[in-house]
Image: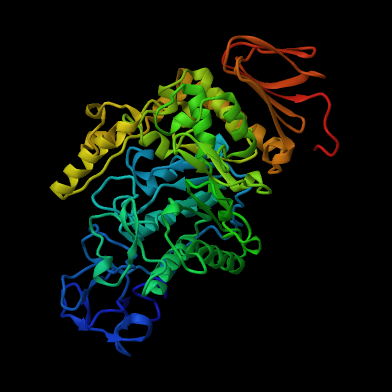
Amino acid sequence: MTADAGIGRTAGPRVWAPEAGRVELLVEGEQPRPLARGGDGWWYSPPGAEILPPGTRYGFSVDGGTPRPDPRSGSQPDGVDGWSAVVDHGAFVWTDGDWRGLPLPGAVLYELHVGTFTPEGTFDAAIGRLPHLRRLGVDAVELLPVVEFPGDRGWGYDGVDLFAPHHTYGGPEGLKRLVDACHGAGLGVVLDVVYNHLGPTGNHLREFAPYFSSTHETGWGPAVNFDGAHSEGVRRFVVDNALMWLRDYHADGLRLDAVHAYVDDSATHILEELAVEVDALAAHVRKPLFLVAESDRNDPRLVRSRDAGGYGLDGVWADDWHHALHAALTGERTGYYEDYGTIERLAKALRRAWVYDGTWSGHRQRRHGRPADGVGGSRFVVCTQNHDQTGNRAQGERLAALVPPARLRIAAALLFTSPFVPLLFQGEEWGASSPFQYFTDHRDPELARAVSEGRRREFAAFGWEPASVPDPQDETTFVRSRLAWAEAADGDHAVLLDWYRSLAALRREWPELTDPRLERVDVRFDEEARWLVVTHGSVLVAVNLGAATILPVPGGIDVLLASPADVRCEGEQLALPADAVVIGRTAARPAGDG
């Protein structure tokens, strides 16, 4: 642990419990040791007390209660209800001294779930697949939450020990080996962190302090206490956790889950405080560090500068971009997809990332979002699929199960040629046949039953048959979600993988494709004929989702990548078959174009 955590290298054991009358340190096999009350609600070992060596199993008891893990435990070798183990972050030998960090602008991210990315489901096994990611052309891996969660398998969004990498994945040392190997391979690392709620099993924070609000509620229950009594200690808990991943695990950035569920009426919002602290750490370690928020509010204040009244985060997920593309490609109109599906809305997403920026949403029956004028494209992270949009379908179907290969190539082309930050989801680059389903491993029978039944009820709005929803608790649901790596070299899978590699190479080669200035992006389209043409400077991307058509291309273009491969531009006319996409350069380049 660092000095910010429960067990420090230069201080004795300590824990924050501001309302406790008595706190004891419990060391496995030894008698309880009373702690002394300090300032700000912290309890400390008396002066001269033994510093516990790395690996020591320990816990705390508050007011004579049940022994519990350290709220800031760095390792839970036996799961969420077991002993905590002391971690010395200074003991790991890093080899990434030459790594100078990864800026978010211009990057291509690759979202992966450690448990299903490889058959072994560990940090060390993931290292063996890094050469594939390098050949693919991505810049960073984005790990779904890796903190300790109940059981041996899960998505990670019900984590409860926020400072402890999951023991089945390989624990603290395994995560450090993966990050070190990523940096050695020229790949950055982004960690998905969850500060809006904790899981129901193993969540013992209430026994230590008022970590949860008595006045604010979210869809998960009481909100995290960011603005009530004793909230300073809760805010410090979250900030210290974020800094730990970036400092002690050498992560390059964090993805903040569902920040719309951060309820904070303080004068300084917790997101702004996080951004200020991360910027300060970046200055100290002399490399870029970034924060990306997931939010469904379409609120540009998340990424506006603090001087302009924003929070100063570096990026935000733009789900509108996914929804507009998905609905146009698949024809789905249920649930929130009812707000999308037209070529006009897809065109707006390609230009602006957010479709709803203060405009009326029929699905919500209200205006939604706020204009993001002046916000550059590199502030928006977009995708054709991700863990949510895949895993929150009844059967966990990927886009490859919903549309033909030609439309997968269209989706990828629009993603890689967008002025935003592209994010891939594991296996999409070869059209993986394995689904990504929702899986859990709750050991409490009542909770397991409630999760399984609740999952089935969830899909009513989409018109999916509840009986068709896989049981999250069934281990086969997890097993069938593992990637089948062997298929990547076969048939249509190999063809699609080559297409992705070619697109990634084009994005690296052409500066227009990473230019964040959205005023340089133009889209023209025909709603009835269902085609659109996107131009970024001299780069042109033509897509046809309707019947075969001929498009005028003044001055002509040099076709560099096309599907089908035999599409050609004859003079100033571009003949596009159905489900075709063409990427090329126009003959005339605007002034100042590179």
Q: Position of residue 278 (x, y in %)?
A: 54, 64
The residue sitting at 24% across, 29% down in the picture is: 466
Q: Quadrant of the N terminus?
A: bottom left
Q: Quadrant of the C terminus?
A: top right
The residue sitting at 39% across, 77% down in the picture is: 9
The residue sitting at 37% across, 33% down in the picture is: 483
Q: Residue furthest left?
A: 445
| 492 lies above or below 427 | above
Quarter of the figure with residue 55? bottom left
From the viewer's perspective, is 204 left or right of 143? left
Quarter of the figure with residue 134? top right
Q: Position of residue 60 (x, y in %)?
A: 23, 74
| 77 lies above or below 59 | above
The residue sitting at 37% across, 85% down in the picture is: 39
> 287 or 256: nearer the eye?
256
Q: How is the image coloured?
A: rainbow
> 356 or 352: nearer the eye?
356
Residue 543, visible in the rendered structure: no
Quarter of the figure with residue 449? top left
Q: Residue furthest bottom?
A: 47
Marks counted in the figure total 0
Residue 591, visible in the rendered structure: yes
| 468 lies above or below 299 | above
Q: Position of residue 542 (x, y in %)?
A: 66, 22
Q: Position of residue 295 (x, y in %)?
A: 48, 48
> 266 or 44: nearer the eye?
266
From the viewer's perspective, is 355 left or right of 92? right
